[in-house]
Amino acid sequence: MTDTAAHSVATEVEQWLARFEQALTEGDSAGSAELFGDESFWRDLVSFTWNLKTVEGPDEIRDMLEHTLGHTRPRGWRTTEPPAAADGVTEAWIEFETEVGRGHGHLRLKDGKAWTLLTALDELKGHEQPAGPMRPKGIEHGANPDRETWLERRRREAEELGHTTQPEVVIVGGGQGGIALGARLRQLGVPTIIVERNERPGDSWRKRYKSLCLHDPVWYDHLPYIKFPEHWPVFSPKDKIGDWLEMYTRVMELNYWSSTTAKSARYDQQAGEWVVVVERDGADITLRPGQLVLAMGMSGKPNVPEIPGADVFTGDQHHSSQHPGPDRYSGKKAVVVGSNNSAHDICAALWEGGADVTMVQRSSTHIVRSDTLMDVGLSALYSEQAVADGVTTEKADMIFASLPYRIMHEFQIPLYDEMRERDADFYERLEKAGFELDWGEDGSGLFMKYLRRGSGYYIDVGACELVAGGDVKLQSGAVDHLTEDAVVMADGTELPADLVVYATGYNSMNGWAADLISQEVADKVGKVWGHGSDTAKDPGPWEGEQRNMWKPTQQQALWFHGGNLHQSRHYSLYLALQLKARAEGIDTPVYGLQEVHHVS
Ligand SMILES: Cc1cc2nc3c(=O)[nH]c(=O)nc-3n(C[C@H](O)[C@H](O)[C@H](O)COP(=O)(O)OP(=O)(O)OC[C@H]3O[C@@H](n4cnc5c(N)ncnc54)[C@H](O)[C@@H]3O)c2cc1C
């Protein structure tokens, strides 16, 4: 951009922000909404709505402001860096404050009106994180006969919390989700216990199949506060990420109750607290937190098909989450039911381990090659180059968050068109082998499939060539039943088997609420995940945000947390701020609490 162009872009944004600020300050919801185009989106992460909420078009925006402006009292809107313009869209990074907090966000203007606005709460006034200039001193100078060392304090806290004092928050599930949220809450000074049935932090990764490496690259995977070091591999092996989580849990000083199983929970309406029974060292302990977070895994509740004859099959059979790896199956016949990520990874490892492997594909799968995905799909936001270009992981998270779900697919489709063209030969080989491919119902590919249904894809790191080359045999169709030693397909084909792996995915997280709390509460909060895209496994109506994730649910004081490493990192902040506000007794009027349309 020339200086003059840059100046006029900056002026355009400044003028818009000034008019916006004036209308907001005057409490003029209608006037504020008029600054948005007919097609426009305001995505708010907690700062106005105490919710994760996207409102669309001037009417919905006006309604949101009518309900929130009075107590939010937003002000101080300004840009944080020079705005930029391209293809008729002006983009600006902005910051603002509200009555109770400070936030930042992102604005896109089209023809002088707002097209997209993201507002995100960063911190609560008076409860800022003790970082940078506000970091704790760590030492108390002077002489004090009652001096308590850091270690003594930590030990005392561990002895008291959950026994003589109650935590404000209990997080059930100490995978990366529970750990990241626990770290945020620790920094915000919210007493929290993370309950984890495994022995060590990181075990949920360690216990997965032997060959597993993360499919997402390191820049996408950072936890809050502590980044992976420069020498960390691009794709973390599962046991290495397990060790990192264990280290992180320790140095972030989390109250992590390992080898502890949450057995039941019920909300005591009168006391305004949960009664959570956990089993630790063989004894039941009752915890009474104000808030309960279920972080038991989006990919944690196995979906195991009920197949007639499963009881007569004499070989090994297990869900992919229980698959130990290939070592004991050398020379054996393995049938892997499913054709998504876990199925491919497990087939490849079994083949490497010397098994005779058949993959059963029931319905089409979306495939992208890892290198191509990194290059075309991710490199602008999460890569070494992105970092060199000033797109830090935090900034990348915000860019991603600034695209409303309603239009996100429009940004994705051209990327997947490019991938399809680039790897045309590869896809042709797969189709020739009989593999059924898809690109998502609207061609929008992997991320949209993930956000809509959390399944239906494989990021190829090598298994596809085995399928294309016939090394891993492919069987299309549905399984009809099992015999003592075979899988029998609906068309009568018999697949002799010593091992059957059900790589058939996972169930909605409200199933965890059914297990732990009650079916009634599970139904009350409804389906978790998806945003109502009206595509397979994500039925409408349109919801605009991930169902029940990181935001208030229909059950008071019950929250769901999780997702991939990016989501756990980014959204743990907003969930932590919501929990902190409640712990401090800050008024948190929720705008647009989601309605429940589906129970699972
Ligand atoms: C095969 C596979 C590969 C994946 N690859 C990637 C990837 O490359 N990149 C990425 O970002 N994401 C990936 N994911 C998705 C996601 O990041 C992981 O599933 C991740 O483990 C989710 O973390 P979580 O903390 O939400 O859940 P989990 O890691 O599943 O942790 C949940 C924890 O809850 C505990 N728990 C459950 N019930 C109880 C109870 N009653 N009491 C106490 N504890 C309980 C479990 O023991 C478990 O440790 C992958 C998932 C799978 C299945």
Image (spheres, helix red, strand yellow):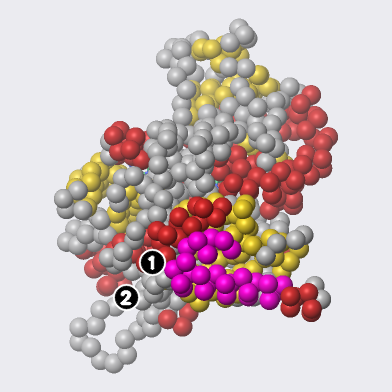
Of mark 2 and mark 1, the one earlier in the sequence is 1
Vertical placement of residue 238 versus 496, above or below: below
In the picture, the disc for residue 70 is: 1
Q: Quadrant of the N terminus?
A: bottom right
> What's drawn in magenta, residue-wise?
9-35
Q: Nearer the viewer, residue 402 or 31?
A: 31
> In the displayed structure, does residue 219 sit left or right of residue 288?
right
Amino acid at the residue labelled 1: Gly
Q: Nearer the viewer, residue 335 or 429?
A: 429
In the picture, the disc for residue 150 is: 2
Residue 116 pos. (x, y %): 60, 58
Residue 444 pos. (x, y %): 67, 41
Vertical placement of residue 426 versus 136, above or below: above
Residue 196 pos. (x, y %): 35, 48
On whether residue 495 falls in the magenta region, the answer is no
At mark 2, the secondary structure is: helix
